[in-house]
Image: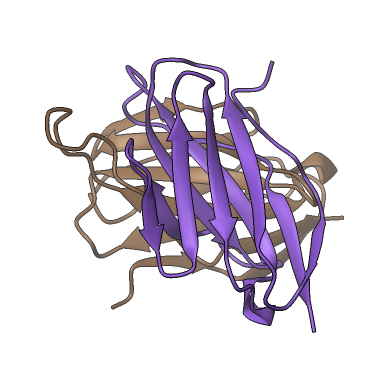
Chain colours: A purple, B brown
Amino acid sequence: RKEVEQDPGPFNVPEGATVAFNCTYSNSASQSFFWYRQDCRKEPKLLMSVYSSGNEDGRFTAQLNRASQYISLLIRDSKLSDSATYLCVVNKKGDDYKLSFGAGTTVTVRA
Amino acid sequence: NAGVTQTPKFRILKIGQSMTLQCAQDMNHNYMYWYRQDPGMGLKLIYYSVGAGITDKGEVPNGYNVSRSTTEDFPLRLELAAPSQTSVYFCASSYYRDRERSGLQPQHFGDGTRLSIL
């Protein structure tokens, strides 16, 4: 089983719509969680960290469910500029140096 | 703010040639990483370093070597280029706070080196 699994999508949504997707992780000892964004042929960029109580950053909301071992990302009022691949990233406790990257979920926002 | 700088941005190599991908960061990060990303795939860790003089293998180290003589620089060496090493290579850096405070911090990436082996 992969350490981090994501639905590859693509999620095709109209502007203004809400889109949400999950990521599951296999190691219950994981301790740090992030969402990164990657535009086509560009470097990954940190979108937001995910905190235990859930957190929001503008139109983006991240949730962590430790019992079911998944994190989620919700994008409200989608913009064309939100079109990208969203990478789920997890750091395992005891594996202090390394992050495990999911393969990404592709979101396409259409006009 | 330069952040993580990778050179070159593009390179075409012939099979069997060697080259070094350069990576430098100016954020005084202790951790540095090399990843490769094949088309449509996720990032795979090649090598990482937790500080000057310390390096370790990641998931896919075969065919690569690294060194970390300074905090700032973390070059990746391909000794005998093979077509399977055609990929986009990303260097990243981060720092680590003790677990009681926040653990591993997010990684900052360079903008990549696109390498083709023909």
Residue ID at (75%, 44%): B41
Is A6 in front, or is A69? A69
Whether A109 is drawn above or below A101: the answer is: below
Q: Position of residue B82 (x, y in %)?
A: 79, 41
In terms of image quadrants, where is residue A13? bottom right
Residue most extreme to the right? B118
Is B109 in front, or is B49? B109
Q: Position of residue A100 (x, y in %)?
A: 52, 33
Q: Quadrant of the C terminus of chain A?
A: bottom right
Residue ID at (65%, 67%): A39
Residue A106 in view (yes/no): yes
Q: Quadrant of the N terminus of chain A?
A: top right
Q: Position of residue B98 (x, y in %)?
A: 14, 32
Q: Position of residue B80 (x, y in %)?
A: 70, 40
Whether B73 is drawn above or below A30: the answer is: below
Residue most extreme to the bottom? A111
Residue B108 in view (yes/no): no
Whether A14 is drawn above or below B27: the answer is: below
In terms of image quadrants, where is residue A107? bottom right
Residue ID at (32%, 39%): A53
Horizontal arrangement in the rendering, residue B16 relative to residue B35 (left or right)? right
Whether A72 is drawn above or below B55: the answer is: below
Horizontal arrangement in the rendering, residue A15 relative to residue B96 (left or right)? right
Horizontal arrangement in the rendering, residue A107 relative to residue B57 (left or right)? right
Q: How many numbered dots are placed on residues in this image?
A: 0
Horizontal arrangement in the rendering, residue B59 relative to residue B116 (left or right)? left
Is B36 in front, or is A38? A38
